[in-house]
Image (cartoon, rainbow, N blue to C red):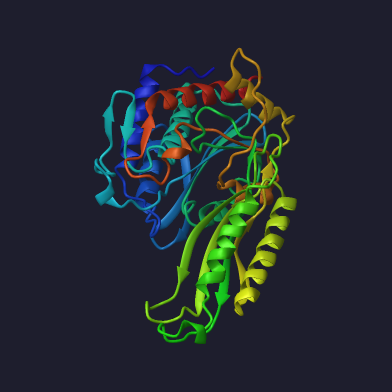
C-alpha cells in the first residue's frame, strides 16, 4: 500500500519547482527540455520511459512500470503551458515562489502540479519493489494547450493500447469528474461592402450585424437548460475582429465563438442557432453570413459504474458518501485518447482551474498533498490481489 508521508510531499514540491522553472510555453512549446528532465527523474528511480517525438523541439514522454497482469492504468498530464505576459505578473513566472500554503509560478496549477503528482506516484511504486496488479503508465504530453497533438501522437503510438483506465490530473479543486464537456469553436464571418466613412449609407457595414448577432446569441445561450450531472452548455465570445481603418465602412467582421456543449444534441442546436441568427442579422443589413467550424470535440462521459471509476470515486470520498457524478466544464487530452482507445476517464488533480491562464498563477500546496493521498489510495485499491 502506498503511504504519503512528509518526505513524499516534499519530494513532490521539489519536482514541481523544477518543472515550473522550465519554459515550456505553447506556442512554441519546446517541450524537449522538460521531457528530458522528466525522463531523467524517472530513470533515477529505475522507471523506464520512451520519448515520443511530435515536431522539432517537441516531445511527449511515456513511462511504464510492469504489473502482474495484462492491461494498464494510464496517468496523464501535459508538459506545456500557455504563454505569460510577464509585465502583468508581480512575481517572475519561471521562478517558483512559496509563501505559506501557496506556490506561485506559470503552470503551478495548470498543470505541472498534476504532472509532479503522478511522477511522484510512479517513483513511490518503483521504490516499493512490489509489482502492481496492472501496468502503471505515465503519458506526459506536448501541445495540450493548443491542439492536443501530443496526446494524439501518444494514442497512435501503440504505447498505451492496453489502457483500461485513464486518469488525467488537471486541476479540479478536489472533485473527481467522470468526463468533460465538448469543445466547439466556430468562426462566424459577416461580409458587407466598403465605402468612404463620410458617406456610410453608400456601403454595407459588416460590424453592425456582427454586433447584433453576438448580443442575440449571448442572450439565447442563457436559455439552454441545465443537464443533471453535466451543467449547462456555455458560450464564450472569444474574439471580435472588424474593419481595417476608421474612415472606411467595414466590409468584413469575424467573430470567434467557444461553445462547451454538454451533449451532442446541444451542440447541434447551437450550430443551428448560430446559422439562423447570423443569417437573419446579415440579411437585415444587406450583408452576407458564413460560418466555419475550427474545432469540434464531442462531450465525453464515462460509465459511473465502471469498477475503476467507482474505485476512484471511493478514494476521493474516503469514509464519506460518494459524490454525485459530474463532468468537467473544460476540455483535456481525453479528446484524443478516449475515442481511440474506448477507455473510461476520470479527471482529478491538484489546484483550481480558475488559476489557469492567469497572471500570478498559484497552487494551494494543501491540494497537492490531498491529490497525492487520493491517487495513492486509488492505486493501492486497484493493486490489491
Query: In front: 70, or 54?
Result: 54
Q: Is any atom of residue 47 visible in this view?
A: no
**x and y percentages locating residue 196 in the rendered image:** 42, 86
Q: Quadrant of the C terminus?
A: top right
Q: Is residue 28 left or right of residue 310?
A: left
Question: Please, is residue 173 above or below residue 380 in the view?
Answer: below
Total marks placed = 0
Q: Quadrant of residue 204?
A: bottom right
Q: Residue at x 51, y 36 (%)?
A: 169
Using residue 373 as the reference point, say whether residue 263 is left or right of it.
right
Residue 131: % across, % down? 57, 26
In the picture, the quarter occupied by the N terminus is top right
In this view, the residue farthest toward the top is: 319
Q: Is residue 283 above or below residue 165?
A: below
Residue 291 placement (x, y as % from top left): 62, 70
249 or 225: nearer the eye? 249
Residue at the spot x=33%, y=51% of the render? 84
Q: Is residue 267 above or below residue 321?
A: below
- In the displayed structure, would residue 274 be above or below residue 195? above
Foreground residue among 289 and 362: 289
Q: Which residue: 53% across, 65% down? A: 211
Can residue 83 be seen from the camera position used here? yes
Residue at position x 38%, y 53% from top? 32
Q: Quadrant of residue 226?
A: top right
Percent coordinates x, y for residue 166 in the rendering? 61, 38
Depth check, front residue: 261 or 114 = 261
Amino acid at each position: 500500500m502506498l503511504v504519503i508521508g512528509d518526505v513524499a510531499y516534499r519530494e513532490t514540491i521539489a519536482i514541481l519547482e523544477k518543472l515550473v522553472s522550465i519554459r515550456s510555453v505553447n506556442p512554441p512549446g519546446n517541450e524537449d527540455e522538460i521531457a528530458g528532465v522528466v525522463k531523467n527523474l524517472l530513470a533515477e528511480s529505475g522507471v523506464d520511459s520512451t520519448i515520443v517525438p511530435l515536431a522539432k523541439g517537441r516531445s511527449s514522454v511515456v513511462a511504464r512500470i510492469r504489473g502482474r497482469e495484462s492491461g494498464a492504468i494510464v496517468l496523464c498530464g501535459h508538459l506545456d503551458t500557455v504563454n505569460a505576459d510577464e509585465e502583468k505578473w508581480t512575481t517572475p513566472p519561471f521562478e517558483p515562489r512559496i509563501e505559506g500554503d501557496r506556490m506561485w509560478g506559470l503552470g503551478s496549477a495548470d498543470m505541472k502540479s498534476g504532472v509532479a503528482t503522478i511522477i511522484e506516484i510512479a517513483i513511490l511504486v518503483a521504490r516499493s519493489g512490489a509489482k502492481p496488479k496492472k501496468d502503471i503508465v505515465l503519458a506526459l504530453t506536448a501541445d495540450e494547450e493548443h491542439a492536443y497533438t501530443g496526446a494524439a501522437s501518444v494514442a497512435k503510438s501503440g504505447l498505451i493500447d492496453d489502457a483500461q483506465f485513464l486518469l488525467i490530473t488537471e486541476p479540479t479543486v478536489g472533485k473527481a469528474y467522470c468526463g468533460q464537456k465538448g469543445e466547439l469553436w466556430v468562426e462566424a464571418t459577416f461580409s458587407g461592402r466598403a465605402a468612404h466613412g463620410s458617406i456610410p449609407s453608400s456601403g454595407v457595414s459588416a460590424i453592425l450585424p456582427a454586433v447584433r448577432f453576438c448580443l442575440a446569441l449571448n442572450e439565447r445561450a442563457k436559455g439552454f437548460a441545465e443537464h443533471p450531472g453535466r451543467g449547462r452548455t456555455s458560450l464564450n465570445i472569444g474574439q471580435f475582429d472588424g474593419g481595417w481603418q476608421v474612415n472606411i465602412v467595414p466590409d468584413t467582421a469575424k467573430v470567434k465563438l467557444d461553445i462547451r456543449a454538454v451533449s451532442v444534441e446541444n451542440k447541434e442546436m447551437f450550430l443551428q442557432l448560430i446559422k439562423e441568427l447570423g443569417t437573419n442579422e446579415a440579411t437585415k443589413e444587406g450583408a452576407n453570413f458564413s460560418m466555419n467550424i475550427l474545432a469540434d470535440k464531442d462531450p465525453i462521459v464515462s460509465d459511473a459504474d465502471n469498477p475503476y471509476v467507482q474505485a476512484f470515486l471511493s478514494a476521493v470520498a474516503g469514509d464519506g458518501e460518494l459524490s454525485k457524478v459530474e463532468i468537467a466544464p473544460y476540455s483535456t487530452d481525453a479528446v484524443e485518447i478516449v475515442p481511440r482507445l474506448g477507455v473510461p476517464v476520470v479527471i482529478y488533480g491538484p489546484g483550481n482551474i480558475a488559476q489557469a491562464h492567469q497572471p500570478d498563477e498559484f497552487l494551494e500546496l494543501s491540494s497537492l498533498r490531498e491529490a497525492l493521498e487520493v491517487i495513492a489510495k486509488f492505486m493501492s485499491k486497484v493493486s490489491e490481489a
